Amino acid sequence: MNWEQLLSLKRFGDTNKRLRKEQDETRLGFEVDYDRIIFSSEFRSLQDKTQVIPLSQTDFVHTRLTHSLEVSVVGRSLGRLAGKRIIEKYPHLESIHGYRANDFGAIVAAAALAHDIGNPPFGHSGEKAIGEFFITGEGKTYKDELTPKEYQDLCDFEGNANGFKILTENRTGRIGGLRLSYATLGAFMKYPKESLPKKPTKHIADKKYGFFQSEKDTFIDVAKDLGLLSRSKTHLSFSRHPLTYLVEAADDICYTIIDFEDGINLGLIQEEFALEYLSKIIRNTIRPENYYALSTKEDRIGYLRALAIGSLINEAVDIFMTHEDAILNGDFDCALLDKSKYDPQINDIIKISVDKVYQSSEVVDKEIAGYGVINTLLKTYTNAVNNCFNNTGSNYDKLILKGLPKTIKTDSSSLYERLSSVCYHVSLLSDSKAILEYKKIQGISF
C-alpha cells in the first residue's frame, strides 16, 4: 500500500475526486469529516448509551459519547505524532502532495470519534442480545430463508459493521451517508472482512467482521479506491488501512486506563491500586510531590491517568513506526499495544477492571435488563414487519408498524433487508429510548 492513495480526499457519494487545492484552508477536508460525525444524530445518541456502568447518576462515569470524545482526542495525538514521522520518512508527501502531520491527526481523530457510532444500546451486551435472538430465540426460524452470510450477519451482529452502514448508507436527501473522505472510512474499518468465515486466521483483522452483506459493494469500492490489499482468494477480506492501528490503539488506551479510573472513582477499586498498577507505566514522568499535593481522589487519579495515557501514546507511535513497512505490506498481525513493553501491566489493569467493574452487580443487572428489552423489541417488530408483508398481520401488528420509522423496509421482498432494517432501528436507540419502547409494548406506561 502507499500513503498517497491511502490519504484519499475523495468523498463517499461524490462523483469526482476533490483535489486538495480545492479545500478551504481554514477547514481542511479531513477536518470536515470530524464535523459531520459530531453533528450527526447517530453520534448525539451516544450520550445516552452505556459504556460500562449503566444509567449512572454520577458525573464521573463515562457514556459512549464521552468515551468516543476521549478516544478521538488520544487518536488525534497519535495521528499527529505518527504523521510527523511519516512525513520525515516520505518528504514528498509534504513537498509534492502538501500533506501535513495535522492531516494524519484529523483522519485518526474522525475515525476514532465514530468508532462506537454503530453500537446498540446497553453496551456490548446489546450486540450479544441481538445475536442471540437469531441464534437461540425466535429469530432462528428465519435461518433457512437466508444465505449463510446473511444469517451470520444477524447472529454475530457487529457494531463495527453497523457503524460502517451508518456512515455510508444512502438516505432520502443524504446520498453517501455522511459523505466522509475515503481515508477516514478506511481508517474506521477495523475488521475489513465479511462475516464468514469466522476468524479464518489469527491476524487481528480477522478477529471480527466489518460490513454487512447489504454494504458489500460499498466496502469493495472504498477498499479498492484506497489500494487496500486483498487477503484471501476464497472470501472478501482486505488488509487494514494503516491508520486503523492508531484508531485501535486510541480505543485500547482509553478503555484500559479510563475504565480503571471509573472503577476507582465509583469505589469499586481501591485508590491504592492506581499507583500499584500504573507505577511502571509512568515511572519516568511521575512527580510524587505533585501527586500527594492534590487534595481529592478524583484529582490524584486524573493526574495518574494523564501521565499513563501520555506514556502509552508515545510508545504506540514508536511501535507503529518500527513496524510501518510491515503494516503497509499487510503483514503486521496484532494490535500495537500487543507489542507494548507495558503489556503485563495493561493486562493486570484489564483483569482487575473485569473482576471489579465489568462483573459488578450494577453492570450484570444492566446486561440482564438489556437482554429482556432487546429481545422483546426484536420479537415484536420482526413479527409485525413479516406478518404484514405476508398479509397475515393482526391489528396489533399494524398498530406496531405505524409507530416504526420509514427506515424499516416493510415492503422489501428481501427477508434479509426486512430483518436487518429492524436490527438497525433497534441499534440506533439510546438506552432510555429502548426502555421507553419496551414499556410501551408491555403496556407499562402510556
Image (tube, rainbow, N blue to C red):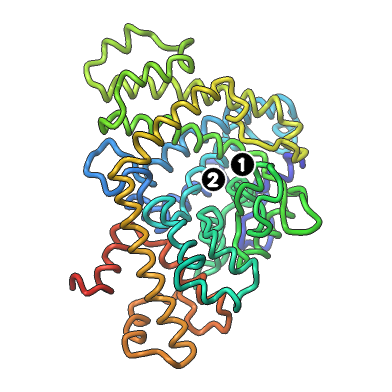
Residue 80 visible, this angle: yes
- Residue sitting at x 22%, y 74%: 443
Task: Residue at 49%, 26% (x, y): give it.
Answer: 346
Q: What residue type is labelled 2?
A: Ala
- Which label number is shown at residue 244? 1
Residue that sits furthest to the bottom in the current view? 391
Comparing 209 with 354, the one in front is 354
From this view, report whether residue 63 is shown above or below residue 93. Answer: below
Amino acid type shown at disc 1: Thr
Q: Tell me where residue 213 appears, x and y as whole percent.
A: 63, 66
Q: In which quarter of the image is residue 400?
A: bottom left
Q: Provide the residue designation for mark 2.
A: 111
CB atoms of marks 1 and 2 within 8 Å: yes
Relative placement, left or right, of 331 versus 313 is right
Please tell me the numbered disc located at residue 437: none
- Residue 221 in which image quadrant: bottom right
**Image: 234 above or below 326:** below
Q: Which residue is drawn at 60% across and 79% down?
A: 145
